Image (cartoon, rainbow, N blue to C red):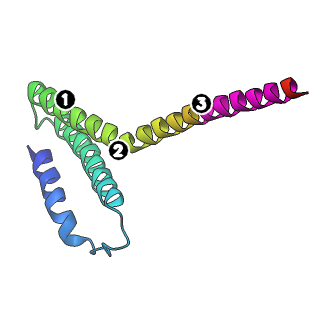
Amino acid sequence: MVTLTLLVGALIVYPLMTKRKDTETDSPFEDKLDHLLLQKESSYLALKELEFDYTMGKLSEQDYERLRSKLERTALSLLKEIDRPKQEKGKEKEIEREIDQEIEKEVLGMRRMKNLGKGKKK
């Protein structure tokens, strides 16, 4: 319970304490990524505090397991969200490679046709 309170408090106070960035120079991706990274760090901190509270005997094993599972799922979903742009960029590069290969095949086919045409004229 203490951990969740600290986590919520951190998420509320952080935007108020940080300086406002120039929104014209920052992309929405950077803002979202910064927010996700903050949430990830908050989740890790909450997990550490939860472990400490359990070790100190402030939580029952059932409460500890339930809260730990919830926080781990949250952290995992944040990690997946943070990695999504990297995965999408990898997919884009793969598509570009496939397109390049198709173009090369077409160019090679056209060159062969051109060479065959030259051979028949002689």
Q: Position of residue 114 (x, y in %)?
A: 77, 31
Between disc 3 and disc 1, the foreground one is 3
| Residue 27 placement, left or right of 94 | left
Mark 3: secondary structure: helix
What residue lies at 22% left-to-right and 37% top-to-bottom? 74
What amino acid is labelled 1 in the image?
A: Ser
Which numbered circle lies on residue 82? Answer: 2
Label 1 neighbour load within 10 Å: few <14, some 14-19, many 20+: few
Q: Nearer the viewer's eye, disc 3 or disc 2?
A: 3
Q: Earlier in the sequence, mark 1 or mark 2?
A: 1
Image coordinates of residue 9 in percent, x first then y, are: 13, 57
Kind of residue at badge 3: Glu
Badge 1 is on which residue?
A: 69
Direction from residue 42 to residue 107 in the image, left or right: right
The residue located at (12%, 53%) in the rendering is 8
Q: Nearer the viewer, residue 2 or 22?
A: 22
Quadrant for residue 84, please give it. Answer: top left
Q: Nearer the viewer, residue 2 or 29?
A: 29
As drawn, the label of residue 102 is: 3
Above or below residue 52? Residue 29 is: below
Is-magenta flag for residue 95?
no
Residue count near mark 3 (Cα–Cα under 10 Å), binned few <14, some 14–19, many ≥20: few
- Give the number of the mark in front: 1 or 2: 2
Name which of mark 3 and mark 1 comes first in the sequence: 1
Q: Position of residue 103 (x, y in %)?
A: 61, 35
Span shown in magenta: 100-119
User: For the residues marked 1 and 2, what is the alpha-carbon distance in whole angstroms?
Assistant: 20 Å
Q: Residue furthest right?
A: 122
> Which quadrant is the N terminus positioned in?
top left
